[in-house]
Image: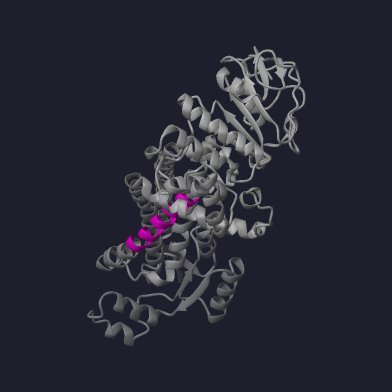
Amino acid sequence: MTAKLFPTVVRGGIQMKLVRSFFYLLGQGIVGVFRNSIMSTASVLVLVCCMLIVGTFGLVIKAVDDNLKKVDSLNVIVAYIDPSATNENIAEMELAITVYNPDVSIEFVDKETGLKKMQEDMGGDIDLEMYLNSNRLNPLPDTFEITFPEAEGAEALNNFVNNLDKITETRHKIGLVQKVDNASKGIAAIAAILMGVLLLVALFVIMNTIKLGVFARRDEIAVMRYVGATNTFIVTPFLIEGILLGVFSSLIAFGIQYYLYTMVIADIVKSYGMGKIASFGSIAPVIGAGFLAIGLFAGIIAGGISIKKYLKA
Amino acid sequence: MVYPNGTVALRNVNLEINDGEFVFIVGKSGAGKTTLTKLLLGEEKITGGKLHAGKYKLERLPKRHIPYLRRTLGVVFQDFRLFYNKTVYENIAFALRVVGEKPSVIRKRVPAFLNLVELTDKSDRFPDELSGGEQQRVAFARALANNPKMIIADEPTGNLDPEMSKELMDLLVRINKLGKTVIVVTHEKSLVDMYRKRVVTIHDGEIVSDRCSGGYTDETC
């Protein structure tokens, strides 16, 4: 009887025991998600909202940023060249600007090309034939179109160009560039604050969901401790529950974000003539990874905090 | 042993229990019996002196080792503490799952313990469908599942009628004959007298008597 009840054979290695325990605990975690289905649904909804706000704000900022600068040529200083400037003067000035800031790109636009561009900009139906055929009658000067990469330092660049000898004046939209930049930063800050608040709410809701599970199982946890369960064994189902809620939320948010981006944001951008936006495929990995990171972070933190006080010996 | 609020629960305790012994710990409520079981289970830490349970030195046992200490002890409580949403079989299997036991081992060992506690025909029942005595037998089977060296029973017959209490004590004697050390914490003197085992009496946190077989006139160990 003794031999049958209490065998002394070695029963599998530690790794195998861990694998067996893991699958058992994974099952327990899944059961936990469905045990409090209402609270689980609430957690997922809040987390999905949090992810969508972050994702949508991020995508809108990216679309606005990409297009405003591109479409309206905001990052350009147009420098008017004195008619008396020789080809050497022009080459010297171009070199001086490049030396001053190697990141800028400079395009020399002669007066004829400038006039053609103006004609195109005005819709092409204005008759400038007379001016185009006569260099003398063309009122436009030769210009440099200097494209700079960022608003920072643009003012100084403008001053430098303006002070060059054969430059009569410059035109630019640096103020607007800075406003767009500030607006983007403002939107990003609002998004960050909203994200922070929502993430806290999501954490709170997930914590409550898991705490309900912990509370319902407090006697079970006490017995688990008496039969020699380690803290890892006790905590893992709750962590898995949190992780599952997080991953599930990120999948739902990803699907909704796809719809929002391709149907709503793209539509708005197009209908307001704000240019093109990147395809969803090109930004999907970043969005997916971001959502998953938020989900995992919320799930693990909430699961860990909820069970902590039940881990005393 | 002094609790954080200053209550002295046990003092001048000098007690040695050998492998395979059957010991009753008796005393009134508040005498320190439960504190002694809590100390053995690592639930409380002694504040002075030494306490060894098998190879474990409890006065300096790190918290992370407590689960492994408990796997060498089987514990049974007055209120059974079963899982009421699990069947009898699952209740016993749970103790084996906690230590990551193979399903094939669980399938072999659980029926063996069900047989020991004579509940084979009730393995699919839920604890609510069993009598108090049967529930306590499930608790014993669960306590034994991990092959502990020692069984600690804290007032195991407290919720049972005299007939069931005797049945349960008979089971404990059988478990003891299987080579397990058995410690029974109780205040039922009639049971203690009936079984004529070693009896340690605690009063106000001190051991006031330690007799080799139950009864008031028996010789001191």
Q: Is residue A312 visible?
A: no
Image quadrant occupied by the C terminus of chain A: top right
Q: Is residue B103 above or below residue B63?
A: below
Residue at 69% across, 20% down: B1
Which stretch did the figure color magenta?
Answer: A240-256
Q: Is residue A205 visible?
A: yes
Q: Is residue B97 above or below residue A211?
A: below
Of residues A150 and A290, the one drawn nearer to the viewer in this rendering = A290
Residue at 56% across, 52% down: B109
| Spot occupied by residue B208 in the image (x, y as percentages of width and height) | 70, 13
Along the horizontal axis of the image, is A91 left or right of A113?
A: right
Residue at 33% across, 46% down: A42
| Spot occupied by residue B218 in the image (x, y as percentages of width and height) | 71, 16
Main SS class of the magenta portion in the image: helix
Residue at 74% across, 23% down: B15
Q: Is residue B117 above or below residue A125?
A: above
Residue B71: image quadrant is top right
Q: Is residue B37 magenta?
A: no
Of residues A128 and A97, the one drawn nearer to the viewer in this rendering = A97
